[in-house]
Image: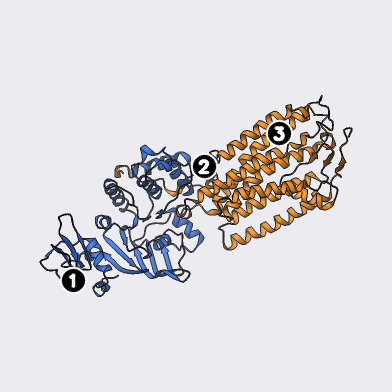
Chain colours: A orange, B blue
Amino acid sequence: MSSAVLVPGVPSTSRRASAEVVRSIARIEVRRLLHQPVFLVAVFLFVLMAVTTPFSDYANADYVVTAENGTETNLDWPVVPAFFLGLGGLIAMNRVAKGASRTGDVLEAAPATKLQRSLALCLVCLVPAVVAFAGAAYVFVFWMVDPPLQAMAWTEFTDTQLFSIMVEGVLAAVGGPLLGVAVARWWRWPTAGAITAVALILWAVLSSVYRDSSWWGALIHHSSPFALAVFNTESSTWAQGGSHHWRVAYLAGLCLLAALAACAHGTTGEQRRQLVRVSLAVGGLTVIALLLATFTGPEGHYGPWNPLW
Amino acid sequence: MSTISSTSVMFTGVTRRYGNSTALDHVDLSLQPGVTGLLGPNGAGKTTLLRLLGTVLAPTEGRCRILGLDPGSHEDRTEIRRSLGYLPQEAGYPRGFTAFQFVDYVAALKEWTDRSQRHAEVRRVLALVGMEELAGTKMRRLSGGQRRRVALAQAFLGSPELLVLDEPTNGLDPEQRASLRGVLSDLARRATVLLATHQTEDVAALCERVVVLDSGRVRYDGPVRELVAQAAGRVWLADEESPSALSSWRVGTGRYRHVAHEAPLGAELAEPTLEDAYLLLRGGQADDAVAGMTA
């Protein structure tokens, strides 16, 4: 240690506004996210899937759809960012948020508030969203230019519906990490992130169980943060009815709720009351969006496999 | 940033309870610029007092003013934190951080938003604790003493007006401790430093004033030399053990050092140290003598 270098630091007058503090913390947290092996693996697998998807067999115009080989469709694709970046991001951001908490009293005694730290972590969740968006845009543009005509469900949707289906994947990729932050804030169990990821997977599986035209089947389907828009087996085919536009609004609402839950932790008094009020409003709108996604929009297809369809 | 007044900290009747347990019991304390030592046995309430000063805890009762501001108010608390350097007893580290990255992270939390200025400040404080050459080393690869120095570095960020240090010399070797004393005495020219420690020699070397806490109450608050003076004539060197001594141990020469009110047989007087005075105070028989000295 040397007292020779003891000079005063830069005075606080050079410090900038609160938003600048949030961005500054977020930049450091981004570096921490990029050092999470789970996230790196998730990004690698996602990019691999995105790059190869337009060249897969079922995306080829010459591909002949039959009951034997028609068990896939190109509309499986939006679930890819949700699965890799949504779940991978959930676990990674959960670790990032928990890791920062290890600093304990050093963190608590700093002028940056818990709300600012939570906002910074929420900003970091845009990283998987950007990756998901780039991948989705790449695949979407590719298919718009060269539609995989033989692939069953592609032509069943309008362009705006297809766009919404792509956006659903992107929203799931930002919602998972946001949920990871919220879980880290409210649930201190070491395995909380993994348990939440498993719960989401089970929810997604449940959403595909009821492949019929019942309203409650559609409600369960649309409520899942990530779900297939179409599903085929060798004997049956199923394209989910309802409005994908409203489903986008519903997923955006879930993202916002996760961010609000993360930010509410550690707040008190009027700040807490404000966040609760906003959360209730967003929650109400989210439920309405879910109901609209379920009960509006085109009817789905549910029935036995029909290669001519 | 608030200006330094002559009294940086003023606690009046501060009590802090955890359930049925009282960690601090109606503590009155004022701190001025300079280094003040805080001594006390385990469980005396030192860490609780420091956490109150660090604005991490709120008192159950009593009034706190820190740097002329009220830590109970959100705005004031943030303002206090801008002028505060705090080293907790246990500082954790996010996984994967290097020493530089850890201090850089804390600097960002301390609102250093300009990246180049922040990095310059991080380099400065790491140099201050002699860690500049290990700045790129992962925290988990550092020794306990090195990690403690990194934790100290974050407390020095921005040359705070109020520096609250909980056992800063834990794990440091004698050379590093001596060096830290130099840094702290330089900082104390303009800042208020409260140093909680079990190392009485650090307090003796650095502090003009010492506060002794015991069972959540202030047992002594006054000049170090006056506390040491209380032990004058009560420290002895003898060839034999003395069962009546408050504290007794065998020193390197083979003789016994006794802290006692009565001279053991064949004993000769020895020069008291702060440790002797502290042991005498803790012995419970000096309460009357000390009560008059307690501020």
Question: Residue A284 vs residue A4: left or right?
Answer: right
Residue found 65% across the figure and 51% down from its top: A258
Q: Mark 2 to mark 1: distance in Å?
A: 59 Å
Q: Quadrant of the N terminus of chain B?
A: bottom left
Q: Residues within 10 Å of mark 2 (few under 14, many from 20)?
A: some
Q: Identify the subunit bearing mark 1.
A: B
Question: Residue A154 vs residue A31: left or right?
Answer: right
Q: Secondary structure at mark 3?
A: helix
A118, B30: nearer the viewer: A118
Residue A93 point in image, percent of width and height: 58, 45
Q: Secondary structure at mark 2?
A: helix
Residue type, mark 2 in image: Ile
Q: Which residue is mark 3?
A: A137
Q: Identify the subunit bearing mark 3.
A: A
Q: Which residue is mark 2?
A: A28
Residue type, mark 3 in image: Ala
A230, B134: nearer the viewer: A230
Residue at the extreme top of the image, as rendered: A62
Q: Residue B261: which numbered mark, if any?
A: 1
Residue found 86% across the figure and 48% down from its top: A213
The quadrant holding residue B43 is bottom left
Residue A61 point in image, percent of width and height: 81, 26
